[in-house]
Image (spheres, helix red, strand yellow):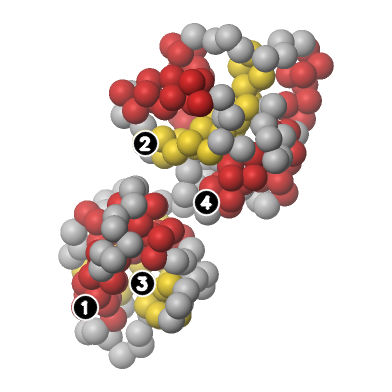
């Protein structure tokens, strides 16, 4: 699961990231509220840990923007303020939990796990559908026109990302960050190779082509 840490204090962010990584989570750090908002709008995170005092865009405004955009991922608010008023503000803006600094990592981890358990019990769809293409997120099966399509793990992740962003153009850089999770050499053709393999499996055998190349920008699944 992917967690976004929006924290301008690099020592705190590194402390949280190291602990969560050891607990099996994949972490991304945003050093200011604007960067955090851009990351969250990608829709590829399962939970966010957001500090209130942030440069460029404060944490409460960030949370308001996220909720106004219709994003429902759990958000834990971090703050040096431990007053009841501060907690109420954080929750009213759309935070799901509030943790005052300094805090123990064990408590943070317990709260994250509790929120993720609660979120998993909501009506989160277990299938993605774009036209006649269907992806079952639980069984990890993909079909088109009822025909089973065998995908390798990274091909599955790439297709899932495209389906979650159906109709939207996603850049190769964004794909690298969200599927491969780190930056390759800009001259690498790993994204192009992945798209080629997907086309061979979900487009070539069928009349209607679904993966569209937008030259100079990226790719879209329609």
Around disc 3, counting alpha carbons within 10 Å, would you say few (fewer than 14), some (14 to 19), or many (20 or more)? Answer: some
Question: Mark 1 or mark 3: which comes first in sequence?
Answer: 3
**Residue matched to label 1:** 200
Q: How many marks?
A: 4
Q: Quadrant of the N terminus?
A: top left
Where does residue 85 sit, x and y in percent of width and height?
Answer: 81, 16
Marks 4 and 3, Cα distance to the nearest angstrom?
A: 21 Å
**Residue 70 vertical placement versus 28 (above, below):** below
Circle number at residue 43: 4
What secondary structure is found at the residue carrying circle 3?
A: strand
Residue plotted at (24% across, 56% down): 154
What secondary structure is found at the residue carrying circle 4?
A: loop
Question: Mark 4 or mark 1: which comes first in sequence?
Answer: 4
Where does residue 209 sit, x and y in percent of width and height?
Answer: 35, 85
**Residue matched to label 2:** 26
Marks 1 and 3, Cα distance to the nearest angstrom?
A: 14 Å
Residue plotted at (28% across, 71% down): 192
**Residue 67 vertical placement versus 147 (above, below):** above
| Residue 79 visible at all | yes
Marks 1 and 2, Cα distance to the nearest angstrom?
A: 30 Å
Q: Quadrant of the C terminus?
A: bottom left
**In the foreground, 93 or 175:** 175
**Residue matched to label 3:** 133
Where does residue 87 sit, x and y in percent of width and height?
Answer: 73, 19
Circle nearer the viewer, 2 or 3 = 2
């Amino acid at each position: 699961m992917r967690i976004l840490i929006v924290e301008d204090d690099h020592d705190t962010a590194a402390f949280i990231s190291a602990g969560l990584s050891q607990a099996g989570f994949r972490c991304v750090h945003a050093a200011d509220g604007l960067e955090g908002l851009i990351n969250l709008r990608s829709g590829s995170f399962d939970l966010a840990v957001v500090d209130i005092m942030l440069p460029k865009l404060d944490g409460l405004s960030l949370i308001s923007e996220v909720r106004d955009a219709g994003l429902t991922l759990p958000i834990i608010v971090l703050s040096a303020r431990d007053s009841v008023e501060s907690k109420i503000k954080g929750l009213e803006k759309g935070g799901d939990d509030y943790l005052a600094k300094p805090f123990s990592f064990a408590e943070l981890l317990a709260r994250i796990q509790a929120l993720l358990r609660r979120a998993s019990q909501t009506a989160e769809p277990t299938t993605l559908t774009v036209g006649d293409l269907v992806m079952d997120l639980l069984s990890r099966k993909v079909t088109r026109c009822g025909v089973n399509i065998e995908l390798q793990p990274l091909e599955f992740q790439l297709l899932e990302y495209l389906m979650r962003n159906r109709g939207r153009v996603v850049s190769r850089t964004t794909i690298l960050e969200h599927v491969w999770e780190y930056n390759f050499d800009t001259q690498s053709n790993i994204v192009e190779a992945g798209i080629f393999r997907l086309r061979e499996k979900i487009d070539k055998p069928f009349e209607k082509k679904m993966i569209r190349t937008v030259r100079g920008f990226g790719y879209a699944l329609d």
